[in-house]
């Protein structure tokens, strides 16, 4: 059995960490196959610039990979990349692996991606499981690409009992190099924690009350807008390799509490039948405020967004060190979402104002206002994968 130190939150603000904006966009555009194709996409409204949002970022070698879920119509590409060597701060995005895969009308194509992970071997694990809108009725999938050859090497279709093709919301993913992948399904209908066994090529799902919203955290305000959605289990993080048993951490979007569960429990599908596994869910403490994405580095430091505080927090959750606020900026850190690590000791965070894209009542306007920013800050660490 695992024993954790539960902390009472009292946060400090760290002034010594510098956050630098590396990229920023007022809207997202692509490297189109031709000017004719581009003009036709605009005319037919297959591409509506102000409707395209980015939510996930990951770095591998000389590229940034970017997820573009389809919250609104007019999003022609859901998986893309930019060169890390690009001098522009707002470069055009190139569809990954290509235009054909992003526009394939069959369910073989990449349909609607919210997030992904790149493992130590250069494999991109793609969550094709954003199913909250009519953009697609294809089943939820996990797709793998070898980033050295850019070839698809795996595609797993989840059964309807695990991932709904109407209402599924595969939100975040971490990779365990012992042969398992853990996924949060932030579905409003059937939220839960999905385990995929690479070796067995099968999946199962854990469901628990800790994965639902905490009503005391509802209706918070970000950038003048009251967020009323009752977001379920969202961000997850995995403790570093080599420290067994490893612990999976998770938190609901509408919630303060962070929970942990041993991966040894998650690997046992047989525990689902009795429900006894729920005794192994441990409350670890509360974050300062509501947050979306989070990530852990190789030293066990948890980085996470502070949505109504327009900031980023750091917390050694299992180390007995209280959480701290690394950075706040009311003007630029609007909805810190996805985190990433490079191989130079920098950690990155994407602030994407995604709450406005997710609310269909918000009218989106094409203008010069910056909506997406990627920040970097020096931590001198790599991700949990290393």
Image (cartoon, rainbow, N blue to C red):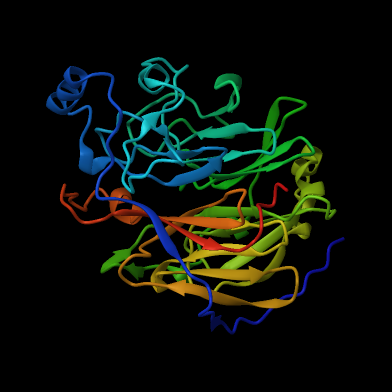
Answer yes or no: is residue 185 visible: yes
Identify the residue at horizontal 35%, vertical 30% (top origin).
Answer: 77
Q: In which quarter of the image is the N terminus?
A: bottom right
Viewer-nearest residue: 272 or 219: 219
Identify the residue at horizontal 43%, vertical 63% (top origin).
Answer: 20
Viewer-nearest residue: 168 or 94: 94
Q: x%, y% of residue 21?
A: 39, 59
Q: x%, y% of residue 213?
A: 50, 61
Answer yes or no: is residue 293 visible: no
Q: Can you say whether 207 is above or below 82 in the image?
A: below
Q: x%, y% of residue 259?
A: 66, 62
Q: Residue furthest right?
A: 1
Instruction: Write down the quadrant of residue 32 in the picture.
Output: top left
Instruction: Write down the quadrant of residue 61 in the picture.
Output: top right
Q: x%, y% of residue 204?
A: 68, 36
Q: Which residue lies furthest to the left in this view?
A: 43
Q: In this view, does 151 lie to the left or right of 205?
A: left
Q: In this view, does 105 lie to the left or right of 384?
A: left
Viewer-nearest residue: 129 or 28: 28
Number of residue marks:
0
Q: Can you say whether 121 is above or below 23 in the image?
A: above
Q: Can you say whether 28 is above or below 339 in the image?
A: above
Q: Can you say whether 264 is above or below 351 in the image?
A: above
Identify the residue at horizontal 24%, vertical 32% (top origin).
Answer: 74
């Amino acid at each position: 059995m695992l024993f954790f130190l539960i902390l009472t939150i009292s946060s400090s603000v760290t002034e010594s960490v510098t956050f630098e904006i590396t990229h920023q966009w007022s809207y997202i555009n692509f490297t189109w196959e031709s000017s004719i194709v581009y003009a036709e996409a605009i005319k037919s409204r297959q591409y509506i610039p102000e409707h395209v949002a980015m939510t996930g970022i990951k770095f591998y070698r000389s590229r940034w990979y970017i997820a573009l879920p389809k919250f609104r119509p007019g999003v022609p590409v859901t998986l893309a990349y930019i060169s890390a060597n690009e001098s522009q701060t707002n470069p055009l995005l190139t569809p990954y692996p290509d235009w054909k895969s992003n526009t394939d009308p069959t369910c073989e194509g990449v349909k609607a991606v919210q997030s992904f992970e790149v493992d130590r071997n250069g494999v991109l694990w793609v969550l094709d499981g954003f199913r909250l809108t009519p953009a697609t009725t294809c089943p939820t999938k996990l797709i793998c690409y070898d980033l050295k050859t850019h070839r698809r090497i795996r595609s797993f279709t989840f059964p309807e009992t695990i991932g709904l093709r109407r209402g599924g919301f595969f939100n975040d993913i971490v990779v365990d190099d012992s042969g398992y992948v853990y996924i949060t399904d932030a579905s409003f209908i059937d939220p839960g924690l999905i385990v995929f066994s690479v070796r067995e090529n099968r999946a199962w799902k854990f469901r628990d009350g800790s994965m639902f919203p905490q009503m005391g955290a509802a209706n918070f305000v970000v950038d003048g807008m009251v967020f009323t959605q009752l977001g379920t289990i969202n961000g997850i993080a995995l403790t570093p390799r080599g420290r067994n048993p490893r612990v999976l951490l998770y938190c609901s979007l509408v919630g303060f509490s962070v929970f942990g569960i041993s991966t040894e429990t998650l690997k046992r599908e047989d525990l689902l039948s009795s429900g006894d596994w729920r005794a192994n869910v441990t409350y670890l403490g509360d974050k300062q405020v509501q947050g979306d994405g989070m990530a852990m580095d190789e030293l066990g430091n948890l980085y996470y967004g502070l949505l109504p505080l327009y900031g980023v927090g750091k917390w050694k959750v299992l180390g007995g060190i209280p959480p701290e606020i690394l950075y706040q900026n009311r003007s630029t850190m609007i909805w810190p979402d996805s985190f990433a690590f490079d191989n130079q000791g920098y950690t990155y965070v994407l602030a994407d104002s995604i709450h406005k894209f997710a609310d269909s009542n918000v009218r989106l306007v094409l203008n010069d206002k910056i909506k997406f920013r990627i920040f970097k800050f020096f931590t001198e660490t790599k991700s949990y994968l290393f």
